[in-house]
Amino acid sequence: MNDTIFHVKDLNLYYGEKHALKDICMDIEKNKVTALIGPSGCGKSTFLRCLNRMNDLIDGCKIEGKIEIDTTDVYGDKLNVVDLRTRVGMVFQKPNPFPMSIFDNITYGPRCQGIKNKKVLSEIVEQSLRKAALWDEVKDRLHDSAFGLSGGQQQRLCIARAIAMEPEVILMDEPTSALDPIATSKIEDLIEELKKDYTIVIVTHSMQQASRVSDRTAFFLMGEVVEYDKTSTIFQQPKDKRTEDYITGRFG
């Protein structure tokens, strides 16, 4: 059985003249947490956005090489981008709930897909909020505005909103950088729980977070993957001096 969900080979990305990603080769495993670490501007968020084609929205962005999801070419003509983004959900740095109720935030995607049955939608809401460890906190105010939630609750709502689409993969771009330590710890516990059902790829600036939550870690530097291995190996026995220097705080 093949445990790889994403196969990335010779990926190069250009923003105009800027060569932002250079010859990236990586296999991302199913039902694992893969962390992308490295200093600001090293390409980790750019790489993350390649996985669900969010870079398509940027003018002057050119991509070469191959990314496959379960052997389907992500940048191929046959692939429907909407389907891809259904399979590969995304949670951003700052919580971005829609300006509507908690209930409507979660049902927005399923409704767009044509689900109208109120009972089915209610089940999706409960199931998604339970999986995002938010149900008990909001079950009595589902029809209140999502903006009434705390920052940490809003971020878990955004995770629930992604889950409602039944994705295979959840991409997280520094999901806790705007949160306090307690809210951060709740999201980290949640990530551990979610990997039973989903593949997670997380960009993080926090080395401690990468070592706590991930199974594999890729260290990016100036658009290249310097090293990609089991997280324990990266943090305890890195093979490249640059990885060791970054992890021990000598730069970055």
Image: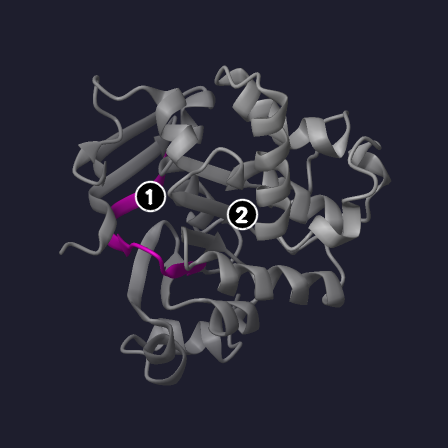
* Range shown magenta: 18-36
Name which residue type carries label 2: Asp
Q: If the image is split into quadrants, where does the N terminus sit?
A: bottom left
Q: Main secondary structure of the magenta part?
A: strand
- Specify whether residue 237 is painted magenta: no
Residue most toward the left? 1
Residue shown at 78% from the left, 46% from the top: 138
Q: Count the marks: how many?
A: 2
Q: Secondary structure at mark 2?
A: strand
- Relative to 220, is 190 on the left or the right? right
Q: Residues within 10 Å of mark 1 (few under 14, many from 20)?
A: many
Residue most toward the bottom? 236
12 vs 80, nearest the viewer: 80
Q: Is residue 15 above or below residue 126?
A: above
- Specify whether residue 26 is painted magenta: yes
Which numbered marker is on residue 21? 1
Residue 234 picture location, percent across and down = 36, 75
Q: Is residue 166 above or below residue 220?
A: above
Separation of marks 2 and 1 at Cα, in angstroms: 17 Å
Residue shown at 52% from the left, 60% from the top: 191
Q: Residues within 10 Å of mark 2 (few under 14, many from 20)?
A: many
Residue most toward the front? 119
- Specify which label sits upstream in the sequence, 2 or 1: 1
Name which residue type carries label 1: Leu
Q: Is residue 196 above or below residue 8?
A: below
Residue 245 picture location, percent across and down = 43, 77
Residue 192 picture location, percent across and down = 50, 65
Residue behind mark 2: 173
101 vs 228, nearest the viewer: 101
Q: Is residue 25 visible?
A: no
- Relative to 135, is 164 on the left or the right? left
